[in-house]
Image (cartoon, rainbow, N blue to C red):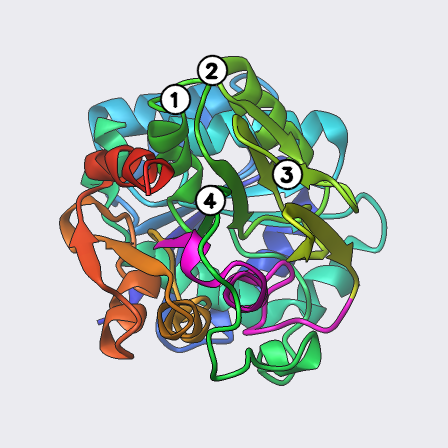
Amino acid sequence: MSISVLIVDDSAVVRQVLAAVLRSDPALEVMNAASDPILAMERMKNNWPDVIVLDVEMPRMDGLTFLRKIMAERPTPVVICSTLTEKGAKTTIEALSAGAVATIAKPKLDLKNFLNASARELIAVVKDAAGANVARLGRQGSKAPDAPRDKHTADVILPPAAETRALSQTTEQVIAIGTSTGGTQALEEVLVELPRVSPGIVIVQHMPEKFTAAFAARLDGLCQIEVREAVNNDRVVPGRALIAPGGKHMLLRRAGAQYFVEVVDGPLVNRHRPSVDVLFRSVAKCAGANALGVIMTGMGDDGAAGLLEMRNAGARTVAQDEASCVVYGMPKEAVKRGGVEKIIPLQAIPREILQQAGR
C-alpha cells in the first residue's frame, strides 16, 4: 500500500520539484499540493494524507499555526521543509517542538538542483515519517540534507577503542546522548528535569547546519543546566550540556583529569554529520567506565556500534524504550547488537543520569 503525501508550500518551484522527487519512488503517492494551509485544509476534508510536507513561512496562515492545528485535531506525521537561515532555523525548532517529525532543509539559491541531489534523503525522510509514533508527538522531531554517499563507519574519523580498559574510574562522569527523529522533544523532556548540579553532557542530535544553535538556545532558556552548541575545545563540566553543531562531528577528548570536545569536519558517518557513532566511540576511548551512554528515539542505526564500544569499555549504557519513542530505530538496533545494558522509558532517563553522578 502506497504512502499518500500532501505538499504545502507557497513556492511553485518547491511544490513541483518535491512532487517529482517523491513520485520517483513507487511507494509514495503525492495526492495533492497546496500553496497555503487554508487551501490544504480544503483538500484534506475528503482525502487525509499519511504524511504532510510543510513549509513554515506562507501567506494567509503560517506553517506553525497549521501544524499545531493538525496535531490538536488529528495528529499526522509532518515533515518541515524549511529555509537554511537563522530565522528559518528558529521557526523550525518551534515546529519540531510542536510535533513535527523531521526537517528537510532547503537553501535560498539553486533550490531545484539541491532538492534533486538530495532525492534519496527526501524519500527516506518521508517514508520513515509515515511510521512515526505521532500519538507520542501529539502528547508532547532530523536528518541532515547531505546528498547520500557510501555509508561510512566511525573509522573514517578515529580508529576503534583499544580492547583493554586503560582508564581508571574518576570522580568526573560524562553523559553521552545520541538521538534523531523525535529527539528534539525527547531531549527537552530529559534536560529540563536535571538540576543545576548534574554531570557534564555531550549530545548528538541529527539536525542540519544552522539549526543546532537555535535548538541549543531554546533548551538553554528552559533548563536549569547550561545548554549550548559546542565549539572546539569547549570544556565538559558539571551543569553543562554541549550539542554537536550541525554539519560537524563532535568527539570527546581528555587532558589529565579534564574532558573537552573537539569539533571537526569529515565524511558522513552512517549518512550523518554529526554522527552518534563518532561521539560514542570517542567517549569509549577517553572516558571508559566514567561514562553513561544513552541512545534515544531516532530512525536508522547510528550509535548502535558506538554504544557497544562504550559498553565494552566499561561504560553503563541505556536505551529509550519503544513505547516512549517516536521512532524505535536507533534504540532497537543498539539492543540487537548487544550494546544496551538497560531499556527504560523516557521519563526514567533523568534519574539514570543523576545516578551516574553518584558513582
Q: Give me the residue at 45% from left, 76% from top.
A: 25
Instruction: In this rendered view, identify the residue nearer to me: 263 or 143.
Output: 263
Judging by the rendered image, the residue that carries numbered circle 2 is 224
Residue type for callout 1: Val
- Mark earlier in primary sequence (3, 4): 4
Q: Which residue is painted at 68% across and 76% down in the image? A: 158
Q: Which residues are magenta?
A: 266-294
Q: Nearer the viewer, mark 1 or mark 3?
A: 1
Q: CA distance from mark 1 to mark 4?
A: 19 Å
Q: Quadrant of residue 78?
A: top left
In reply to whether residue 293 is colored magenta, the answer given is yes
Q: Are marks 2 and 1 in contact (CB under 8 Å)?
A: yes
The three-letter amino acid code for the residue at tag 2 is Gln
Q: CA distance from mark 3 to mark 2?
A: 19 Å
Residue 63 is at least partly visible in this image: no
Q: Which residue carries the number 3 mark? A: 212
Residue 14 in the figure: left or right of residue 33 = right
Callout 3 environment at 10 Å: few (<14), some (14 to 19), or many (20+)?
A: many
Residue under label 1, please give it.
Answer: 192
Look at discs 4 and 2 and give the one toward the viewer: 4
Instruction: Confirm whether residue 79 shows in the render.
Output: yes
Which amino acid does the dot numbered 3 rest on? Thr
Q: Which quarter of the image is occupied by the C terminus?
A: top left
